[in-house]
Image: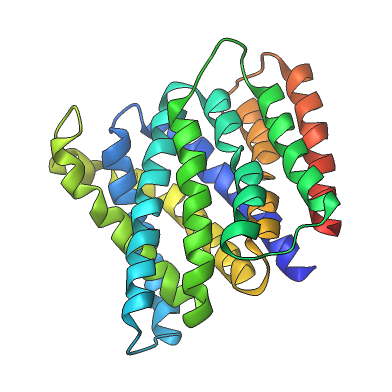
Amino acid sequence: MLWLGMAVVAGFFNALWTALSKKILHRVSPREFTLVFRLLTALMLLPLALFQWTWPLSLKWWGLTLLAGFFEGLRTWMLVRGVQKDYYTTYAFYNLTPFFTVLAAPIILGEAQSGSLVAGGILIAMGAFIFHRMGGWSWGGLWGAVFSTAGVIVNKMALADSPPMFFAFWSFGIGALFLVPLESLANSRLRPKIMVKEWKKILAPAFWSFLASVLFYVALSHSPASKINPLVRANLLFGFFFSYFLLKERTGWKQKALGGGLILTGLFLVAIG
């Protein structure tokens, strides 16, 4: 149960950094934010990674870590792009991750699935969509869910051969650097002067993400991905709290409370599954 609790607390810190990032995104682009954000998180992970340093590692591990970094960079970039436009709709689509994970984990990782675990993943996804504003759509949230699911699967595979903090450091560092070649695909160029100017404001979200990452990767290294990834989706419940009090987004709270009830039920079913 310790690992399950760590996953829920990681969801709290994830919701906090996401809420804090919305105001910063008025001044920097999603790609600029993600690059600075993930580099800062990787630097915070470095001291812990040094305590767990493992060398040398297999080519398979490096391949999985490069792939994990690729998915991590895309996941965060897509999530931030969506949050910049619509916080709730993005989170609703992003929280399809439990449903995708419950489907993918048995096939790829061979994890056993109980009926309550599957039902819990479905309820979490359904609850997320009750938060969804009718008529809205978030490609950032949807693709973020896809990349998040793929990332968790690859993370779980890589963690079989290395300590969690060592892996997280490399994955986040690669995820940040991967965004630089996206220069040719983005609509606007990176602005180094703006990134240097705003990095102190990004420090707080990076710190909360650092804490979330420590909890998440340690929990993932000890428990099945099909349990840990859905439980982290408690971040939508915490996100509702933060958006209500920090972002002053107070419309449709009854509908969101109903969605929260479904998510809470789903989390319970996942925990006992």
Query: Looking at the image, what colour scheme do you see?
Result: rainbow
Measured as percent of width and height from the top left, residue 78 is found at: 40, 37
Q: Is residue 191 visible?
A: no
Q: In the image, 249: left or right of 47?
A: right
- Please state, as top left, top right, bottom left or bottom right, where the C terminus lies in the image: bottom right
Q: How many marks?
A: 0
Q: Is residue 58 visible?
A: yes
Quadrant in the rendering for residue 26:
top left
Camera-side residue of 131 and 158: 158
Quadrant in the rendering for residue 122:
top right
Where is 158 relative to 191, above or below? below
- Please state, as top left, top right, bottom left or bottom right, where the N terminus lies in the image: bottom right
Q: Residue furthest front?
A: 107
Q: In the image, 104: left or right of 159?
A: right
Residue at image x 37%, y 68%? 65
Residue at image x 53%, y 78%? 160
Camera-side residue of 196 and 184: 184
Residue at image x 30%, y 61%? 174
